[in-house]
Image (tube, coloured by chain):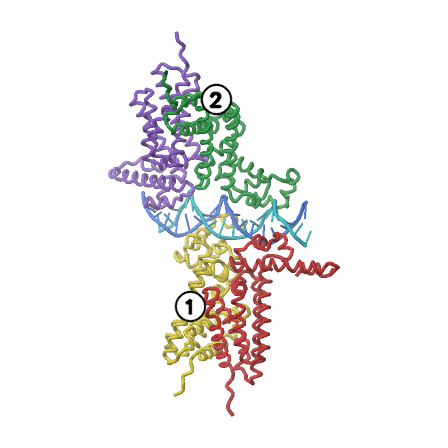
Chain colours: A yellow, B red, C green, D purple, E blue, F cyan
Amino acid sequence: MTRVNKTDHAVPRRSMRRLREKENRCNTILKAAETLFARKGYHQTSIEEIADLAEVSTGSVYFYFKNKEELLIKLMQEIGHDLRKSMGEEFQKTEFSFDGFRMISFAFLGDFCLRYPEKIAIFFRESVGQSVEVEEQRKQVFVKLTLDIKDAIIKISERQGKHFVTNLSPELIAVCIVGIYERIACYYLLWQDRSADVMQMAQESASFMLGGLNNLFIEDAPH
Amino acid sequence: MTRVNKTDHAVPRRSMRRLREKENRCNTILKAAETLFARKGYHQTSIEEIADLAEVSTGSVYFYFKNKEELLIKLMQEIGHDLRKSMGEEFQKTEFSFDGFRMISFAFLGDFCLRYPEKIAIFFRESVGQSVEVEEQRKQVFVKLTLDIKDAIIKISERQGKHFVTNLSPELIAVCIVGIYERIACYYLLWQDRSADVMQMAQESASFMLGGLNNLFIEDAPH
Amino acid sequence: MTRVNKTDHAVPRRSMRRLREKENRCNTILKAAETLFARKGYHQTSIEEIADLAEVSTGSVYFYFKNKEELLIKLMQEIGHDLRKSMGEEFQKTEFSFDGFRMISFAFLGDFCLRYPEKIAIFFRESVGQSVEVEEQRKQVFVKLTLDIKDAIIKISERQGKHFVTNLSPELIAVCIVGIYERIACYYLLWQDRSADVMQMAQESASFMLGGLNNLFIEDAPH
Amino acid sequence: MTRVNKTDHAVPRRSMRRLREKENRCNTILKAAETLFARKGYHQTSIEEIADLAEVSTGSVYFYFKNKEELLIKLMQEIGHDLRKSMGEEFQKTEFSFDGFRMISFAFLGDFCLRYPEKIAIFFRESVGQSVEVEEQRKQVFVKLTLDIKDAIIKISERQGKHFVTNLSPELIAVCIVGIYERIACYYLLWQDRSADVMQMAQESASFMLGGLNNLFIEDAPH
DNA sequence: CATGAATGAGTCTTCATTCAT
DNA sequence: CATGAATGAAGACTCATTCAT
């Protein structure tokens, strides 16, 4: 029905498109998928809807992506990559001082989350619990992200001449930090619209992390 | 719920037995759903499979539950309820001292997660990103859980005569705590099998939280 | 289009059906598939068409049959079974004399082919070259059919006190006979309508086979 | 065909080379199609796969062939042509004596089938039951093949001064012979690998045919 | 002539849900 | 209350074919 009208007068979707962009179909499709997955949910979004929004045929979606799952996985990986890059840069800029935590809090909450709420929805909601394959890829993305943070934590501790109570600590702290960001983003941005308070939260969550971190350092024996 | 009311108005003679039987069926079905959702994923599990495992007909599933979604929601709510109850008890037992954090860490990670890995899978994975309705219910469950923790935090701080840097802090801390538990459970129990280290993690995550909490108290000005 | 009208006024296909027959849906579906496969070809027939002709929903087709392939396989096996049964009876009736060949020729060409041209189309045309699985099943059906004939040939030769030139001969003769019937059926009934000459052909093809058979007996040394 | 004509009208200077190149391409594609159709089946083979194996683009396939069907038809016709040519030569060589049957058996089973098993798969399996058009062409190819054999049979009988029991006989015998070869090839070469016994089968099948043929000659009345 | 990206109609298949028994 | 056969809407995915470059 919708379908029929679409091709009725042979209004080629192509013409308009080709004028605007002759490449980057791939990105257009991904962007459309991101928008719809975030808006309607992964399962509630059909390939046809994605194709329509991207001004492309369903066949084209399958030309660029193996299947629907791959769209979700690609989006997730891309977001994971961006987050890692952004975090890495912040840690670099602050030369692996404690201040890095404050910076990544602002970068993530104050910048990324506010600018790309759909990416947050994809990363923390739509990519969860969809299929074995998606979950496996999600795990890998999150493990990489966590290990990045763990490495940064180790570097920071070394620069401060501190040691952790156990070998587990650095990774555990990284896991905690990821969990904190995740839940703050979901709770305050996806579930409620508290974007006005985001800066405050960035500030306080950084304090929280630093306090937590400090508590897992071994007390240096006084002279 | 709708269905349950049907029989509510009439509590006749042999009702007791009937009620127990009904509750049993209901629970058998829920248990089957929990097992399968956790093992194969919500979408990959069909009503027929649930009915088979519960040894009832598909029609019976629909007698006790409005639809598949309701199964998931009920499971989620049940788990949320159990967690809140358990946490509440721990805070009570420790009389809202700082030690409560250590206790809930052990209760959650050392006890709940190890005993009911399927519930963890349902609560933190399968109930995420499935539909608008599930997400709405999930939000409510999580908000309740978070507010419980927030209340406990406020009580604890009051008992210690401490004040928070902002009004946001108590809730934010609660959100962080939920996030920490969530991610630790996923990372170390669903994604990897690090059950051997769980006690250590409970210990350290409690320290982490306490450190974080402390950092969001206002420094009492020394007189 | 066709679709829309079908359900527009909610004219339940069920009502009419239930009145006529409350069982044997399975056979109705198979019969519909047979008719359509023979008329339009296996690939050119959609499940929906089969369901329509059987006055059943598409879902019902999948309730009784795993997939489209299974419909074809079942049809093929059924036909194979019928043919073997019919042949077996003819050989029995003629007490494994040479006359059996004449009888099966009449039974197959004069009876079966004329009565069930669609079965011939399924057995010798539509079930060929469709997929690996169909081909495998087809092979098994044909091998059984061939071995039945081989056994009959051996019995006949024994009764006549004859021996074959080689061990291969009985099976080879059976293979030839199957080939002869197959091609006659295709050539004279599917490709041309020579049903008028069928009896003549049955007669002559039996003679041909007998001549062939005789030529593969060892010449008994004259005393 | 349509396409070929395009260049037919203009046979200019460097045409020779072009023609050879074109023919090469054409054959390369046909060869690729033959290989894949035989290996994976007609429907399971996509144009893209054929193009890949032939190291051309999908567009090129459509330059040389109207559609996928035409590829199959061309292959089938080619094989039919080769078989007729080969048979004709054998009959010629044996001067239309009874020995011709032995010769074509060896030529077909001992030579053609062993050398070109893919052609056998195409001719007797993949080209069956695919579409109305393919079936129509298949019929024509087989009818030609059959009539060739019929003609040879008539010639042979004339040379021997024999007469057939009815007018139908020569064609019927031809049909039988085709069926015999077809089924032997499928049964012993496509379904089982009995290539070791092929010579024996050629020998015996020829005997079978001769016996059959003889049985359809009218008994010459002794003076 | 060659290319290969783009098309989109066409189909199979699934499965939550219903309801007559 | 229980059953499970029946439904049919919905969607993913394929692939022969086209055509601008």
State how far apart marks 2 and 1 are (Cα).
83 Å
Q: Which residue in the protein does label 2 denote? A: C97
Identify the image quadrant of the C terminus of chain D: top left
The residue positioned 32% from the left and 35% from the top of the image is D115
- The answer to whether A59 is drawn above or below residue D135 in the figure is below
- The answer to whether B190 is drawn above or below residue D23 in the figure is below
Q: Quadrant of residue C2?
A: top right
Residue at the top extreme? D223
Residue B194 seen in render: yes
- What type is the residue that disc 1 sits on? Leu
Residue D108 falls left or right of residue B168 = left
Identify the image quadrant of the N terminus of chain D: top left
- Residue C132 is labelled as none
Tell which subunit mark 1 falls on: A
- What type is the residue that disc 2 sits on? Ser
Q: Which residue in the protein does label 1 denote? A: A145
Residue A2 falls left or right of residue C209 = right
Q: Position of residue A21 (x, y in %)?
A: 40, 57
Residue at the bottom extreme? B223
Q: Quadrant of residue D83?
A: top left
Q: Quadrant of residue C35?
A: top right
- Badge 2 element: loop
The answer as to whether the residues below labels 2 and 1 share one chain is no
- Badge 1 element: helix
